[in-house]
Amino acid sequence: MDKILKGIMIYRATVKEGMVKQFVKIKDNPTPKAVFFTCIDSRMIPTRFTQTNVGDMFIVRNAGNLVPHSQRFPDEQDTNEPAALELGCVVNDIRHIIVCGHSDCKAINLLYKLRDPEFASKDNRRLSPLRSWLCTHAHTSIEKFNELQAHDFNKPLLFQAETPLRKFVAYIDPDKKFNIEDRLSQINTLQQLQNIASYGFLKKRLEQHQLHIHALWFDIYTGEIYYFSRAAKRFVIIDENNFKKLLQEVVVFYS
């Protein structure tokens, strides 16, 4: 706690005045550009690696960057994530939703172990809120992972996009760069796009292309960020070589 208190004192002396000015500037006209779902992992600092500022994004964090499917809740009203989607995309008319997974995710590493039916049993789940959360809301990610593993990670996966009639194909780590848990993390990140599209209160906006969903993936130990390109059917590193192509894809797909 001493580190936190000392940090607050540094904030008061260095950045408080400038930040308050930014708060005042956007007080009556905030224009956030995205709802950003990511993990609670302390290494994930999305405002830093996206270089966003006060008022730019709504950030929603939980273990494993999950957005539970609407079928898990009566009337879509029983958890934080859909409430955040409504606040961001309906109340504040934000047009972009981003789900950002990451490497070495402790929640996803545990999810990988929960493929063991005994470990994932109801008795074991009752001992751990985290196991219960993952087993309840990430089982579809495991199903897709098992499907891919059965084909030695060479088969593309099919995900629903903004509507049931729109699909996208995904090759997961075709260059075999990442470990098996990180592949599961990438699958899980894409699965959340499908889950987001399940909410009825977003249906009209998604169908009319007024709302768009994206996936990012952060490799913690290299600092590289990947964007899921529907054109390339894979996660593509965002760098000097790919930036213009990815920007053009975003303009074409999501304008």
Image: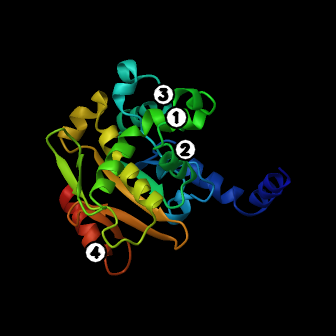
Q: Earlier in the sequence, mark 3 or mark 1?
A: 3
Determine whether 190 is above or below 208 in the image: below
Q: Mark 4 highlights which residue?
A: 244
The three-letter code of the residue at mark 4 reads: Lys
Residue at image point 33% right, 53% down: 214
For mark 1, does the 10 Å Cα neighbourhood hold few (<14), some (14 to 19), or many (20 or more) residues? some
Q: Which of the two discs, 3 and 1, sits closer to the camera?
A: 1
Q: Describe the element under mark 1 as helix, strand or loop.
A: helix
Cα–Cα span, label 4 and label 1: 39 Å
Q: Quadrant of the C terminus?
A: bottom left
Q: Which residue is farthest right?
A: 2
Residue 142 appears left or right of 62: left
Q: Which of the two discs, 4 and 2, sits closer to the camera?
A: 2
The three-letter code of the residue at mark 3 reads: Thr
Q: Describe the element under mark 3 as helix, strand or loop.
A: loop
The three-letter code of the residue at mark 1 reads: Trp
The three-letter code of the residue at mark 2 reads: Ala
Percent position of residue 155, x then y: 23, 59
Residues at marks 2 and 1 touching, judged by CB atoms closer than 8 Å:
yes
Q: Mark 2 highlights which residue?
A: 63
Cα–Cα span, label 3 and label 4: 38 Å
Q: Mark 3 highlights which residue?
A: 79
